[in-house]
Image (cartoon, grey):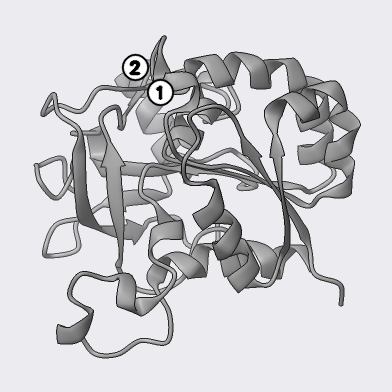
């Protein structure tokens, strides 16, 4: 079967696009990197792809808040993105891309939310343990036990409009990825949870499961030797992050 085609959008300040392209290729996709301005000129160009990714970085310098300027530009693609989504396309937002999806209103869907400053008041760059709490909810979500990925953000705290809205998202299985402690339980405590997100939220899906945003960086752990303790852990064939990309590719073949 032909390989699915993935498009990685870039903008001024994006700095994780090359790693994201490499991850998609390792997972078996054909990938094009396209500046957001080119897509704004020809929104129908999205019709040639099955997967869209907004990678990490500091788009437009995060001058008005993390992801806000790119989110406003993505908003102009609303019709094209809805057509892309409705025909079964998958959308992934990583770190700054997650911030963009939330601030553009593509996530979480049904309730308003935002992503705000870490409780620590600092940029946090560290490895975290994560649990998928909505198995089977999305092709992006890997099966199995906790995974490890790095985070690198100053504004990573996912906050819903109210506690009731957060509970509704939880009940619907949309709070799909959580920071967990040593016992594998969702945590709000630092440093296991690097930003203080309520209920340990690290990643969210839309009601269909075809849009997924997460603060950790799966593209930075696609090979096992990228783990800081790789020489002291049992050998694995690949990094945990690659499983996220493989799941999406398998779903679009």
At label 2, counting other C-alpha atoms closer than 10 Å, the crowd grade (few under 14, some 14-19, many 20 or more) is few
> Residue at left 42%, top 29%?
58
Answer left or right for 165 relative to 48. left
SS type, badge 2: loop
Residue 44: image quadrant is: top right
Residue 170: image quadrant is: top left
Q: Give the distance between the C-alpha atoms of the residues marked 1 and 2, in whole angstroms.
A: 5 Å
Disc ID at residue 25: none
Q: From what the image shows, is residue 89 above or below residue 144? A: above
> Residue at left 32%, top 78%?
225
Percent position of residue 27, x then y: 61, 71
Q: From what the image shows, is residue 153 above or below residue 165? A: below
Residue 64: image quadrant is: top left
At label 1, counting other C-alpha atoms closer than 10 Å, the crowd grade (few under 14, some 14-19, many 20 or more) is some
Percent position of residue 125, x then y: 21, 45
Instruction: Say which residue label 2 marks.
Output: 162
SS type, badge 1: helix
Percent position of residue 198, x then y: 24, 33
Looking at the image, can residue 104 be seen?
no
Q: Are marks 1 and 2 in contact (CB under 8 Å)?
A: yes
Answer left or right for 87 relative to 159. right
> Residue at left 14%, top 50%?
192
Residue sitting farthest toward the top: 64
Answer left or right for 190 relative to 215. left
Answer left or right for 115 relative to 92. left
Instruction: Say which residue label 1 marks.
Output: 165
Q: Quadrant of the C terminus?
A: bottom right
Looking at the image, can residue 246 be seen?
yes
Percent position of residue 75, x then y: 67, 17
């Amino acid at each position: 079967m032909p390989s699915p085609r993935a498009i990685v959008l870039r903008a001024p300040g994006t700095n994780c696009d090359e790693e994201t392209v490499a991850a998609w290729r390792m997972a078996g996709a054909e990938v094009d990197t396209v500046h957001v301005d080119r897509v704004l000129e020809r929104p129908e160009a999205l019709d040639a792809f099955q997967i869209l990714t907004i990678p990490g970085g500091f788009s437009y310098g995060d001058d008005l808040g993390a992801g806000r300027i790119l989110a406003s530009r993505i908003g102009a693609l609303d019709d094209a993105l809805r057509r892309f989504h409705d025909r079964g396309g998958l959308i992934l937002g990583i770190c700054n891309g997650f911030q963009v999806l939330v601030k553009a209103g593509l996530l979480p869907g049904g309730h308003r939310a935002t992503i705000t400053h870490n409780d620590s008041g600092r940029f946090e760059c560290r490895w975290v343990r994560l649990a998928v709490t909505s198995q089977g909810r999305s092709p992006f979500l890997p099966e199995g036990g906790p995974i490890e990925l790095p985070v690198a953000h100053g504004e990573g705290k996912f906050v819903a409009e109210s506690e009731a809205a957060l509970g509704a998202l939880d009940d619907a299985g949309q709070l799909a990825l959580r920071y967990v402690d040593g016992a594998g339980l969702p945590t709000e405590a630092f440093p296991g949870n690097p930003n203080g997100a309520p209920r340990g939220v690290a990643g969210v899906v839309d009601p269909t499961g075809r849009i997924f945003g997460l603060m950790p960086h799966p593209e930075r752990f696609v090979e096992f030797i990228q783990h800081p303790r790789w020489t002291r852990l049992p050998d694995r064939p690949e990094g945990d992050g690659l499983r996220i990309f493989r799941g999406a590719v398998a779903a679009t073949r």
